[in-house]
Amino acid sequence: MSSAPEQEAVQAGVQAAVPAGRTGNGRPPVRAPASNGPERGRTPPLDPVWPGASMPLGARFRVGPDGVAGTNFALWAGGAESVELCLFDEEGHERRAPLDELTHEIWHGFVPGVLPGQRYGFRVHGRWDPWTGARWNPAKLLLDPYARAVDGDFELPPEVYGHVRDWPEQHVADTVRDGRDSAPYVPKGVVVHDDAPGDEWVDDRRPKTPWADSVIYEVHVRGFTRQHPGIPERLRGTYAGLAHPAAIEHLTRLGVTAVELLPVHQFAHEDHLLRRGLKNYWGYNSIGYFAPHAAYAASGTGGQQVDEFKRMVRALHDAGIEVILDVVYNHTAEAGELGPMLSLKGIDNRGYYRLQDDARRYADYTGCGNTLHVVQPHVLRLITDSLRYWVTEMGVDGFRFDLAAALARSMHDVDMLSPFLAVIAQDPVLRRVKLIAEPWDVGSGGYQVGAFPPLWTEWNDRYRNAVRDFWRGALPDVRDLGYRLSGSSDLYAWGGRRPYASVNFITAHDGFTLRDLVSYEHKHNEANGEGNRDGTDDNRSWNCGAEGDSEDAAVLALRRRQLRNLLTTLLLSTGVPMLVAGDEFGRTQRGSNNAYCQDNEISWVDWGLLDDAGWRALFDLTSRLIALRHAHPVLRRRAFFSGRAHSADGLRDLAWFTSRGTEMTERDWYAPAATLGMYLSGRDIPGRDARGEPVEDDSFLAVLHAGDLPSEFVLPGGPWAPRGYEVLVDTGAESQGCAPGATYGAGAVITVEARTVLLLRVLS
């Protein structure tokens, strides 16, 4: 327990002394400058505060006893000595009231007359003892972890840090409690009417696209809409902008079935970025797991952002497009011991975060300074309550979990029987939505591709690496490519998992765009102000003979051919394809492979590219390939290939061919090769349609040739294609993909142009 003099010193804005013997350097206790922070802008205290209820957590407007309208506030703060509710008016004046009721470590109270739109926060009292992980500081206004909406921006002056950040003796700074008021510099939670009449979510409005039929489109809400000429200026960069018919028209023409939104939970900007005049653009710095990021709202931040987000989801659903959220539950914006005190750190630092044996330090499996302690029941409840909220009340259809391996850790090691994965598996709401893991973190043993249990799909970076390496001529043989093209059975054919457990991608927000992948061999992140040290050096890219922009017609033609090859490979592969917004028409980040802090033209989608005939043709090819995928179940299989003959003629569901027209032998798989033929049989596809009938489809032969010279290829004859073949796609053609046209007989010798994909349909 803190001593009375220490508590009085903190309340007066005077720094409490460092506990004796804890500095580790023999120096006398240190005090920070006095201030009048906590008393600034105070108005008379709230009265009355009724006992209220301990559940649900957060601020919930309701009609209380005797028909009195008000808001119930409930905050889990294990180990705290007391909690104050703080209400703010439009001028920033603050009224406080203690939440005196305590039930199972939840402080709660009902305040009559508090209506939707009210801004609020908490101050939590307790010990200051960083050496044991205790960092309570009532001078810091804390955001409710369950806040449904947030008003205001996070600034990061010294006042928002629980410790004395600007103290001259920096080596002891995080052990000295700061007594200055943070309220003027932090946003507040907003009371929202969760149960507004007519706002119920109707489940049957969801598209409910089966996994095998899905095509995912990774989108940044602001970046996708910021420069779209068809969206009104006032709506650009917002949820309303993404819901606009002009934005949805592009998605439906392209044919994608789901948008995967980069983080839209309320997030904060890092101090080191703000000092350089930059901001966190991607949003992987969450601080409010229930609140739509306020800066993306066109309608206002007093709770209106919640309704705007719901309208966006409904508009996308009406167009048949699912909404998947990229969520960051592995860490928060409070960073490590030198980070700001914004919410969880001040509520119960030891309860919410994984700490090292030296409890002053944080266990960091994320590379962001802290890791949420998901094995703690209240932390697990925070995450699952948040997930259910976004499904049941906001209408989303699934989640992509950033650094999901960090969530699957038990005490230290990644554990596929961890509490988090177990809870998700049995939850009646969450087990029915799309669950995508980024199956790694930065800790020891964190790389877990292929290890997540059934119900989960995974970002498959081994697919990305194999396809990039093949098309730049860096694969030693084609063994790995064969697995990746056919659904990665070596990774996922266990425990009842299916080919759609693999989310196939060549690019993502993190790394080069597709156009930059064929235009740069080295990262160019100078605009980030980090000396080009940030971002990966393992790009697996090829600039086609010139670094960056080029006026060489041969270089430009080769780059566009490579783009066609990469997109065609992705959309013909078994698994779930993921595209990045703008890759379908040549978006560039000018060589940046880490544009996380570039909220400008580097990151925004340039819609003017569609005015160029060549880039428009690339969009048309992508759209045609997606349509082809939707039309043919053999391209979106629900079960792995067996490779065995299913009929007397010896026809197998999957066969591999050399350029000689012969089936691949064991020796062929291990030999260097630039050409690979993949035969997909439409006969005897596993499973039945909705009426219980067998699924039949056309058969196809895909020829992938990554060599820098033309090559002859012998088309296989019977039983594969007794009547011959029809060309559907030829990425070597200047028209960016041929319409159905040329036909060839079985056994014909054709010439495949350098660096080309051919897709041929077997004639029936």
Image (spheres, rainbow, N blue to C red):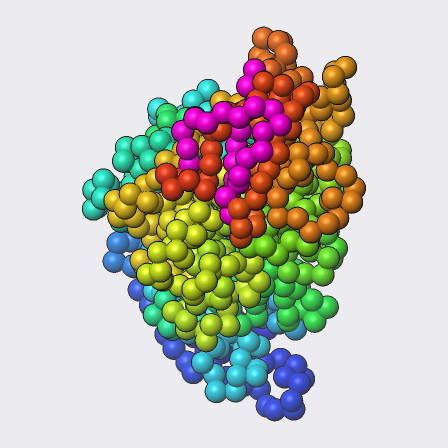
Q: Quadrant of the C terminus?
A: top right
Horizontal relation, residue 763 to residue 275: left or right:
right
Residue 761 counted in the magenta span? yes
Nearer-the-camera pick, 179 or 558: 558
| Residue that protrudes farthest toward the right in the picture | 666
From the viewer's perspective, tell me whether residue 315 is left or right of residue 507.
left
User: At x 31% / y 58%, what residue is drawn?
Assistant: 601
Which residue is nearer to you in this view: 402 or 50?
402
Does the magenta-highlighted stretch encompass residue 426? no
User: From what the image shows, is residue 575 above or below residue 320?
Assistant: below
Residue 584 visible, this orientation:
yes
Question: Which percent across, then down, holds residue 341?
Answer: 49, 65
Which residue is the extreme one toward the bottom?
27
**What stretch of residues is rendered in magenta?**
737-764
Residue at position x 53%, y 80% from top? 173
Q: Residue at x 39, y 51 (%)?
A: 557
234, above or below 690, in the image: below
Q: Residue at x 31, y 37 (%)?
A: 247
Number of on-image labels: 0
Query: Residue 85: percent from the left, percent from the top?
Result: 44, 53
Q: Nearer the viewer, residue 571 or 661?
A: 661
Question: Looking at the picture, how far across and down is residue 621, in whole percent?
Answer: 40, 36
Q: Position of residue 372 (x, y in %)?
A: 61, 55
Q: Quadrant of the N terminus?
A: bottom right
Against 443, residue 497 (above or below) is above
* Residue at the far left in the pictured view: 233
Q: Would you say residue 430 is visible in this rendering?
A: no
Vertical placement of residue 195 versus 51, above or below: above
Quadrant in the picture for residue 589: bottom left
